Each structure stands twice: as C-alpha cells, then as structure tokens.
Amino acid sequence: VSLLEDGYKLIVIDSNINSSPLALVRVKEILQNKNIAIEEIIFKNGDIRDVNFINNVFKEASLANNPITAVIHFAGLKSVFESVKNPSLYWDVNVVGSLSLLKVMEYYDCTTIVFSSSATIYGDDWSGSIVESTGLEPKSPYGNTKAAIEKILEDFFKISGNNWRVANLRYFNPIGAHPSGMLGENPLGIPNNLFPYICRVAKGEYKNLVIYGNDWPTEDGTGVRDYIHVMDLAASHRAALDYLFNNEPQFISLNIGTGRGTSVIQLVDTFKRINNCDLPYVISKRRKGDVPTLIANNQYALSKLDWSPSKSIEDMCKDGWRWNLLNPKGFENR
Ligand code: UDP
C-alpha cells in the first residue's frame, strides 16, 4: 500500500505457504477507497529457491520493457521456535532462497535491495538500547540465517566493487495492522509472539495470556521491548528505497524501532484501556532465551532516512484489534 501510494509499480512474489492471496485484493480495495489509481499489481506464485522461477519473473519484466530496478526481500520463514526444531529448512528457505534471488538479480544487473533483517541477530548477551555496530551473535538458527544473509549481501557488495545498494533493515517488534482494518496478520497455529496472543485472548479464543516472568530487572518485572507499528515499518522500507536510489552505492544496516520500551504489563494495560476489553493473564516462569530489555537505538536510521516512526502504542493496540475484530479468521473469512 505504501509503495503504491507513492507511485511505484510492483511485482509481488509469494509462495503463499503462510499468507493469503486475498491480501493483494485488499491492497487494491484500500487504494480504490482512497481514490488512488494504480496499475495492475503483477503477482507471481512461486518459491524463492526456484532459480528458474525467479529468472522468469525478471526476464518477463525485461522483455516487457519494464526491468526490475529494485527488490524488497521479505521472503523467509520467521519462527525462532520452529527454526530450532528444523534448522535445515531455515537454512534452505532463507539462505539458499536469498542466494538464488541474488544470483538472478546480479544476472539482470538489478543491484538495489532492501532486506528484512531482524534485531534477533544481536543475540542475547546484552541488554538495553542497541546500536548497529553491536557484534552479531544470533542465538537461534533463525537468527543465524538472517545474519548469514547480511554477510552474503556484504560479499555481493564487495565483489561488485562496492557497486550494489544494500539496506539491511533490522526489525525490532512490529505489531498492529493497517488502520483500515483490512490488512493484518493471522499466524498459523498458536502464536509465539505476544501481540497476536493478546488478540486471541481478547477474542476469547484462549482463556488467558501467559506472561513469561515478572522478576526481570525492569520497572514492573516483565520484559521490555521496542514495539513498532507495521505502518511505520512499511514507511521505513519506502524511505530506505528512496535513500538507496538517491545516494552512492553502499551497504548499510539500520535499526528499525521507535527507541521506546514497553513492558508486557504496559502493553496489556494499554490494550485493555484503548479497546475496552478484558485481558486475563497469569504469570509463569521466564521463557528460555528471552532478554529483559531490547530497545533500538534508532538514531542512525533517523539520520540517514527521511523517516521517523510516528505511531504510538495506543495506535498499535487500536489498529491491531480493529483488524482482529473485522477479520476474526484472517483473510479467508471477513
Ligand atoms: N511474552 C509473554 N507471553 C507470550 C509471548 C511473549 O510474556 O505469550 C513476552 C516475552 O517474554 C517478551 C515479550 O513478551 O518479554 C515479547 O515477546 P515476543 O515473542 O512477542 O517478541 P521477542 O522480542 O521475543 O521476539
């Protein structure tokens, strides 16, 4: 939505293994509702590991005199828990998939890429506000794959004679939904993450939230994270593309967070207050691998990009809940 509002032409590639093709129908509806005319969004269903498939997408675009000029690479598996159980799947989809994409990009001389990285690559040996120069020490196969992809991108950049334009966006904790209530997330199975779990408790699907520890060294004892509204996250991608297009070729890593911390209890209280709903919880022991506090130092991103996150925790709770209320079963069932 953000890119189309800005006049970009898009080709979307997705295997749809954990997403719905209806999301793109909704994207078009949102723009129509805003009277924004867009060209057809080209959609290609396929797997990122399939070099022939990716090659055909690039070839078709070139033959149509509309060569692909940049890629935003979000394609990957993203469950820390699942990655511990099945690391080879994560290396295959995330790393082999990225490599097949990069080889095709190189072939077609498309050398501008914004990559969805993650704050999880910083590991868990620190606490507090993190800067980009912090050493990478991922603690899960998922984190390892994100760090490895950053390294591969760096090598592509170097071997090209520093000619690629690469932005690694290291996401902190994205939550919320499009303010229209028409686009949002619906994780398969029991959510591992706090916000989708809160939504399911509020909907009455689960009896209560389980808070992993109230004995952390934080103000109220519960874990503190840097939650960022998905619309601010989306805007950071648009800003990163603009930045890459308008500056010298470079390899850059940016923390995408608000720089503000919110505890589990604070998020629960805000959600209840803003949405006027009940949210029972119980306290259990700490979850393995968790850290007390994880907050982005976002100064570098703010200084480089024409971007700053503008949405509050209240906005995140309101928009996320609106999406859940309007789409209790996700895209398939309004
Ligand atoms: N959390 C919790 N209960 C849950 C899920 C998460 O108390 O059901 C806590 C978790 O311990 C952490 C915070 O919520 O302090 C954010 O966790 P999440 O999994 O959403 O993101 P993470 O920062 O771990 O990637």
Image (spheres, rainbow, N blue to C red):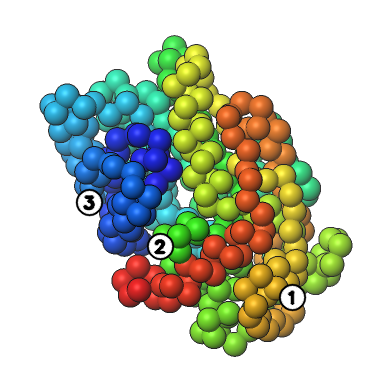
Residue 198 point in image, percent of width and height? 60, 73
In front: mark 3 or mark 1?
A: 3
Q: Which amino acid does label 3 sit on?
A: Asn
Mark 1 Cα shell of 10 Å, populated few (<14), some (14-19), many (≥20): few
Which numbered disc flags the more N-terminal residue, 3 or 1? 3
Residue 235 point in image, percent of width and height? 51, 41
Q: Residue 198 carries which label?
A: none
Which numbered disc flags the more N-terminal residue, 2 or 1? 2
The residue indicated by pointer 1 is 285
Vertical order, 43 against 59 (above or below): below
Q: Which amino acid does label 2 sit on?
A: Met
Cβ atoms at labels 2 and 3 below 8 Å apart: no
The residue indicated by pointer 2 is 182
Residue found at x 67% / y 75%: 272
| Ligand 1 neighbours mark 2 (CB distance < 8 Å) | no
In front: mark 2 or mark 1?
A: 2
In front: mark 2 or mark 3?
A: 2
Using the rendered image of the protein, determine whether residue 276 is visible from the camera's viewpoint. yes
Alpha-carbon span between mark 3 and mark 1: 42 Å
Q: What residue type is labelled 1?
A: Lys
**In the visual, does 313 lie left or right of 113?**
right
Residue found at x 49% / y 45%: 234
Residue 192 point in image, percent of width and height? 55, 68
**In the visual, does 155 lie left or right of 265?**
left
Alpha-carbon span between mark 2 and mark 1: 36 Å
Q: What element carries label 1?
A: loop
The residue indicated by pointer 3 is 45
Vertical order, 327 against 29 (above or below): below
